[in-house]
Amino acid sequence: MILVWLFWVTGILLVYTYMGYPLWLCLWSALRKRPVAADSFEPPITVVMAVHNEANGLARKLDNLLELEYPRDKLHILVVSDASSDATEAIAESYRDRRISLLRTDVRGGKHYAQGMGIAQANTEFILFTDAAPLLDRLAVSRMMRNFADPEVACVGGEDRIIERGVVRHSESAYIRYDMMLRRMESSVGSTVGVSGAFFGVRRSLCEPWLSDRSSDLQLALEAVRRGMRAINDETSLHFYGTTSSHKDEFRRKARTMLNGLVVVMESLDLLNPIRFGHFSLQLFSHKLCRWISSPALIVLFVSSVLLSGHGVLYLAAALAQTATYLLAGLGLLVPSLQRHTLIRIPSFFVLTNLATLVAWSNLLRGQNSSIWDPTARA
């Protein structure tokens, strides 16, 4: 019976995606560790920060960058304004005599276009990217650069840490911790699938050629593997940012970033060849494709459970459990004050994330592009 087949296939997919893959990574990383040959390493670097209308928090971020514990004569900061229309450029200009330069774009090209402009302006072998919102730990850059002492490492991502405030609270933090756990385990066996777009570093050679309409944090991590090198997550390179101010903002951010990710992965399907890329092919399939496929799979599982609920206790229990989850999620999204309860907060964030994924799939199939971005407001 096709309904039974759909129920079991989607159920197994979801269990594997959220539980099976992490368990497999845990086992694999215990058996096949591949350590990074990190060592003291302080080459000249350029920090490229693409911004658009970030006047509210830009001074705080620039002060934060100037306080980093890294040799002053080896750290240059380049602010690339993507046609900002507020006081962003004036604020950046006021820091000009403090190792900070400003580069303007005449028309909006998007974050990754602005990053490409910054790379063209930089004259160092190593480039670090960061956003305006997150604040870096004072040792974040020096700890990140230690990894580049290993010639096999081409891309290093920092560790996301959430300051839990606002409406989308502990649920987002729990999601970030889960994703960071996966990246750490992936790094320990070879390469991680994507790095944090808020703060990461690369060898300049990895950026050539530069794709100005592709999500750089995912594109460069995959390109490192394609070139026989490594992309890793460094859990000691910390950066901190607040939660999004509303579910609406978080939904838009996730739909945009997932669409960007889908575009990159759909153009990188050659990396799914296990003969050439080994275990990383399974990582890419499991971490990205399985998670994105899970969103439509949830719909199929729910419909098949309901239609099969009269044919056995298992199907009835599955239908009731999913119905309860979606009702709790709906309550949380409609009445944000209820999110102080974990029983409502977690389902709400889970449903929000999967709805954003469905929107991303829809936008991908319609050929839409989200390279032009508006920075998400955070607490």
Image (tube, grey):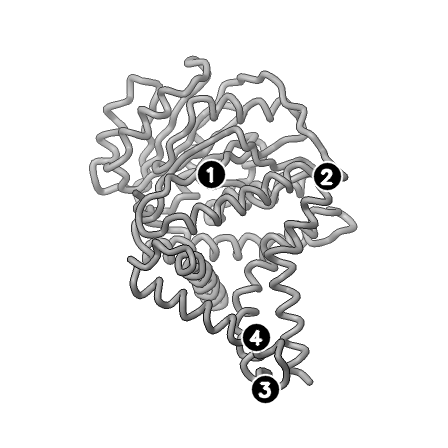
Q: Is residue 69 above or below residue 117?
A: above
Quadrant housing the C terminus: top left
Label located before the other in sequence (1 or 2):
2
Picture coordinates of residue 136, whole percent (x, y): 41, 29
- Amino acid under disc 4: Ala
Picture coordinates of residue 143, whole percent (x, y): 53, 23
- Amino acid under disc 2: Ala
Spatial CA span between label 4 and label 3: 10 Å
Q: Residues within 10 Å of mark 1 (few under 14, many from 20)?
A: many
Q: Are marks 1 and 3 in contact (CB under 8 Å)?
A: no
Spatial CA span between label 1 and label 3: 45 Å
Q: Which residue is mark 2?
A: 30
Residue 310 tag number? 3
Image depth: mark 1 or mark 3 in front: 3
- Amino acid under disc 3: Gly
Viewer-side residue, 330 vs 210: 330
Label located before the other in sequence (1 or 4):
1
Callout 4 secondary element: helix
Callout 2 secondary element: helix
Residue 160 tag number? 1
Image depth: mark 1 or mark 4 in front: 4
Residue 242 visible in the current orientation: yes
Which residue is rendered at x = 75% and y = 38% of the image? 32
